[in-house]
Each structure stands twice: as structure tokens, then as C-alpha cells.
Image: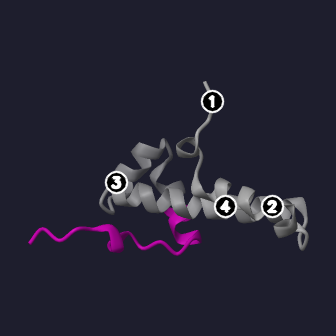
């Protein structure tokens, strides 16, 4: 079982493509924080799309409590309304 490009997120691939030179300006902790933030934003966006903006359903999908998910959405400035599809 080998990993393919489809098995890892674009954030990881992009960080690998940047090479070591892309990380010379900050510490391990800063680099880790940037990758984690990028992952969270991407994951939350996909989660909200899959749940069509329904935070309760998204929390179930993610295995998180609704309140905790809401805090993450707020942290990243993700508006659930942007994912709600019109019924019309």
C-alpha cells in the first residue's frame, strides 16, 4: 500500500513542492501552524459544502460537537450561509 497524490491534501503537496527554502523564514512551530490553518480551512470548506451549510450535520460528519465546529468556522471566517443552496 503506497500513498498517491490523491491520498494527501493539496496543502501537503504544496508544502512539499515549496521545498526547504520556502520555510527558511520561520520556525517549525510557525510552519506547522500555517499548514494546520490551511488544512482546517480546506477541510471546513469541504465539510460545509457536503452538508450544504448545515452546521449540525457537518459536526456529525466530522465527529465533533456542534459548538466546537462552530468555533472553528468562526476562527476561519467561514459563513455557513455561503454553502446553503436555494430551494428555488
Q: Which mark is residue 50?
A: 3
Disc 1 marks which residue? 2
**Which residues are the magenta region?**
70-88
User: At 22% across and 68% down in the image, what residue appears?
Assistant: 85
Neighbours of disc 4 within 10 Å: few (<14), some (14-19), many (20+): few
Front residue of 57 and 40: 40
Q: How far, Cα to Cα, is label 3 from label 1?
A: 28 Å
User: At 86% across and 61% down in the image, what residue appears?
Assistant: 20
Determine the image quadrant of residue 25: bottom right
CB contact under 8 Å: marks 1 and 4: no
Disc 4 marks which residue? 14
User: At 12% across and 68% down in the image, what residue appears?
Assistant: 87
User: Which quadrant holds the C terminus?
Assistant: bottom left
Q: How far, Cα to Cα, is label 2 from label 3?
A: 32 Å
Tag 1, which secondary structure?
loop
User: At 47% across and 45% down in the image, what residue appears?
Assistant: 62
User: Along the polypeptide, which appears first: circle 3 or circle 4?
Assistant: 4
Seen as rendered, the residue at the extreme top is 1
User: Along the polypeptide, which appears first: circle 2 or circle 3?
Assistant: 2
User: Along the polypeptide, which appears first: circle 1 or circle 2?
Assistant: 1
Amino acid at each position: 500500500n503506497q500513498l498517491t497524490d490523491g491520498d494527501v491534501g493539496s496543502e501537503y503537496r504544496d508544502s512539499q513542492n515549496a521545498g526547504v527554502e520556502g520555510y527558511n523564514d520561520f520556525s517549525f512551530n510557525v510552519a506547522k501552524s500555517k499548514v494546520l490553518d490551511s488544512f482546517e480551512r480546506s477541510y471546513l470548506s469541504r465539510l460545509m459544502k457536503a452538508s450544504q451549510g448545515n452546521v449540525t450535520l457537518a459536526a456529525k460528519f466530522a465527529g465533533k460537537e456542534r459548538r466546537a465546529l462552530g468555533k472553528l468556522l468562526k476562527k476561519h471566517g467561514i459563513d455557513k450561509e455561503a454553502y446553503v443552496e436555494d430551494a428555488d
